[in-house]
Image (cartoon, rainbow, N blue to C red):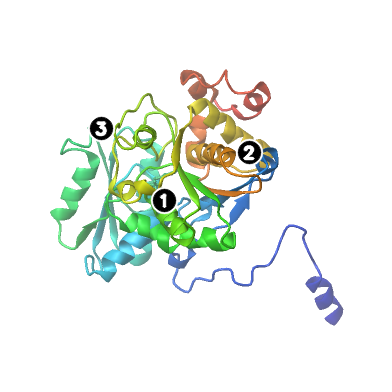
Amino acid sequence: MSRLFSTTRSIKIASYTLNKNSIKSDNGILQSVGNTPLIKLNKLSEEIGRNIYGKAEWMNPGGSVKDRAALFFIEKAEERGLIKSGGTIVEGTAGNTGIGLAHICRSKGYKCVIYMPNTQSPAKMETLRLLGAEVHPVPVVPFDNENNFNHLARKHAENMENAYWTNQFDNLDNKDAHIASTGPEIYNQLSGKVDGFVCSSGSGGTWSGITEYLKSQNANTKSFIVEPPGSCLYSYVKTKGKSLDKEGGSFTEGIGQGRVTGNVAANIKLCDDSFLIPDQETIIMLYRLIEEEGIFVGGTAALNVIGAIEAAKLLPEGSNIVTILADSAHKYSNKIFSKKFLMDKGLFEGIPVELREKYAILE
Ligand SMILES: Cc1ncc(COP(=O)(O)O)c(C=O)c1O
């Protein structure tokens, strides 16, 4: 018996370290939000002579970075007495925020109502329904039209007793979720040596909150916004707030804006520069992350990694640059690995042959 015990104790795996402080949740799923690993992208870091780190946000229980804002919205509303037991959480969202809210609503016993543009994939609507949410697909209209999905969500909550509209775009609890969690996690994981931070923006909560936290710890940390085509922040940053011009569109989902949201506005003065990345580069990076790093992530994560490389070019050798790997590739696989989809978007031919033969293999 004792021989067996000592043999068992001596088993080691080279790349595994037992973290004696890893999270144990005595509060169901809630405490499993956040505290994600920070992963050095080995090949890319070596290539560029700077350390590129990606925060593995797909490892949240709802599968994305948006779980953090979802938890924070609900617990802040509870703290302020804006929602009570048995109440309803309402949001306008095309995806990950809704998934995050739906998980947390089930865990806390709230109802969850989601308004989304009816152009979104049936799979997204189905996922939300399978998580117990009530889904309202509505026609696409601009933000200044009162039938925009965000306004419909607000009105739904206003017309109900004990209902709360989380308002991810302009509710600053969104950025504060990252001041409370993601920012300090990154800072601790790199023992304070964060030279650059870069990510894309949907509501802008992730970029804004992490930037605010990191710059409050060290004013020399640089922060950048990386943009897909069809979004206005690149032009806004480059023209110092004079233009909201945007052009084209992107296959990435969950990012890109036609306006400066409240969460972005709160910290836009802290933005050092912005990069605009064509979809062609993003899809190649998405495949390279699988091929070279073994990392299977969605389009926004691939775009963010290119942003980190652009930022790295502006920073001294040996710098640490952090970005966000917002979610995994699973939800998008019927697009990003589809030869037909990529051909329709004009993205197939530009992918190196060895990568597209290996990865663009779905119909
Ligand atoms: C996949 C993905 N990446 C990035 C973002 C952007 O995060 P934020 O809304 O904090 O700007 C989102 C937002 O929903 C997302 O779903």
Q: Residue at x 34, y 54 (%)?
A: 132
Q: What label sits on residue 140 in the rendered view? A: 3
Residue 256 versus residue 17: which sits nearer the camera? 256
Quadrant position of ligand 1: top left
Sequence-wise, which precedes: disc 2 or disc 1?
Answer: 1
Residue 101 seen anywhere in this rendered image of the structure: yes
- The mark lying in front, picked from 2 and 1, is 1
Q: Residue at x 52, y 25 (%)?
A: 280
- The mark lying in front, picked from 3 and 1, is 1
SS for callout 2: helix
Residue tagged by mark 1? 206
Residue 212 at x, y = what percent?
A: 41, 55
Marks 3 and 1, how far apart in space? 25 Å
Residue 345 at x, y = what percent?
A: 46, 21
Residue 288 sits in which quadrant?
Answer: top right
Q: Is residue 363 above or below residue 184?
A: above
Residue tagged by mark 2? 290
